[in-house]
Amino acid sequence: MLKKEELPDCPVATTVQLIGNKWKLLILRNLLSRPWRFNELRKDLEGISQKVLTESLRSMESDGIIVRTVYAEVPPRVEYSLSELGETLRPILDAMQAWGKDYKERPE
């Protein structure tokens, strides 16, 4: 997790720093609907490696965007969900979805 003084001065650059890669955005897209388990995410996100998924989840957890919940069961169950802070990204991701849909439907 970067300290706030290490983040870029530009607010857009800060947002990009925190969520601006392909995999983080797709993980967030999934977590908007419900909590997900690690293997569910890995299967749904075609092409993501276990290493990249682990690093992305750890980074977003460290930044306070997602919550990792471990259930005391045998075998142990771990779920990832949006934190309260992560939920504030919903309008941004909704706007990205709407823009992408409009772009695809635009006549050439």
Image (cartoon, rainbow, N blue to C red):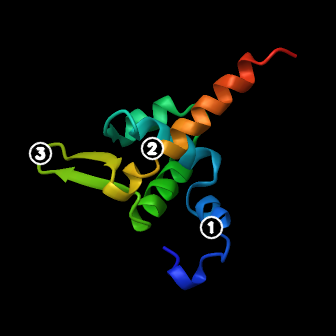
- Image quadrant containing the C terminus: top right
Question: Residue 40 at what x, y percent from top left?
Answer: 39, 33
- Observer-side mark, 3 or 1, equals 1
Q: Quadrant of the rendered structure where residue 105 is?
A: top right
Q: Nearer the viewer, mark 2 or mark 3?
A: 2
Mark 1 and mark 2: span between their CA atoms? 17 Å
Give the SS element for disc 2: helix
Mark positioned earlier in the residue sequence (3 or 1): 1
For marks 2 and 3, the one nearer the N-term is 3
Out of 103 and 55, give the one closest to the viewer. Answer: 103
Residue annotated with mark 2: 90
Residue 78 sits above or below residue 102 on the image: below
Q: Residue at x 37, y 33 (%)?
A: 33
Q: Is residue 15 left or right of residue 81?
A: right
Q: Residues within 10 Å of mark 1 (few under 14, many from 20)?
A: few
Disc 1 or 2, which lies upstream in sequence? 1
Q: Report whether 22 appears left or right of 87.
A: right
Q: Nearer the viewer, residue 40 or 64?
A: 64
**49 vs 10: above or below:** above
Name which residue type carries label 1.
Answer: Pro
Element on which disc 1 rests: helix
Neighbour class for label 2 at 10 Å: few (<14), some, many (≥20)?
some
Residue furthest to the bottom in view is 5
